[in-house]
Image (cartoon, helix red, strand yellow):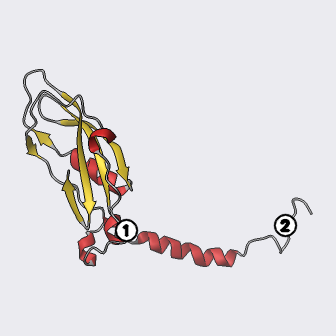
Amino acid sequence: MTGALSAANVPDMRALVLIVPLVLSACAANPLSDPRERGPFIAQSQMPLMPNVGRAAPSQGCEGEPLSAASAPLPDYPARGWSRGLQGWSIVQFDVAQDGGVSNARIAQSVPGGSFDNEALRAMREWRFRPLSEGASLTGCTVMFEFVLGEVRIR
């Protein structure tokens, strides 16, 4: 019987009516609230093997001008990573303008990525350096953020 519906091949809509509210209520939980309110960080994964940063993201264009940070806030530990006990790292490359502002921040490599990368990029948008020499700018500068055991470190 082609193209005809029978009782045997029609899905039971009652099951969908029960499942959809459960899925939607699970989505309603706020995964972005402060994870520290949920208790201590409990690692559920091993720290991923860290790369050689110089090989993973060469920074040849970030030479010749000394960089002095005026403001460099650390990223927050992602709430989802915290609640799932995940650890990881993000290598960020960025450019520095003559006025010390950061631009063109991008992820060069990361594990596991996702919310760790989002937090790393959010923090980079707030970084400021002391002004560079007249007409100078730096490209391809590199920083690595480690998200380890509920804490964030710069490497």
Percent across and percent down for residue 43 are 32, 72
Give the residue displayed 31% in from the left and 68% down from the top: 82
Task: Say which residue label 2 marks.
Answer: 5
Q: Secondary structure at mark 2?
A: loop
Q: Is residue 63 left or right of residue 84?
A: left
Look at label 1 and name its amino acid: Ser
Percent across and percent down for residue 114 are 38, 54
In the image, residue 63 above or below residue 154: above
Which quadrant: the N terminus?
bottom right
Give the residue displayed 27% in from the left and 60% down from the top: 147
Q: Are marks 2 and 1 in contact (CB under 8 Å)?
A: no
**Foreground residue, 50 or 91?**
50
Give the residue displayed 37% in from the left and 54% down from the top: 111
Dot in front, 2 or 1: 1
Q: Farthest residue toward the right?
A: 1
| Residue 103 visible | yes
Percent across and percent down for residue 115 are 35, 57
Q: Quadrant of residue 14?
A: bottom right
**Foreground residue, 148 or 1?**
148
Look at label 2 and name its amino acid: Leu
**Foreground residue, 37 or 61?**
61
Q: Is residue 17 left or right of residue 99?
A: right
Q: Is residue 26 left or right of residue 95?
A: right
Marks 2/1: CA–CA distance = 48 Å
Q: Residues within 10 Å of mark 2 (few under 14, many from 20)?
A: few
- The disc placed on residue 22 is none
**Foreground residue, 21 or 59?**
59
Percent across and percent down for residue 133 are 7, 25
Give the residue displayed 90% in from the left and 60% down from the top: 2
Q: Total of numbered circles in the picture?
A: 2
In the image, residue 112 above or below residue 27: above
Task: Say which residue label 1 marks.
Answer: 45
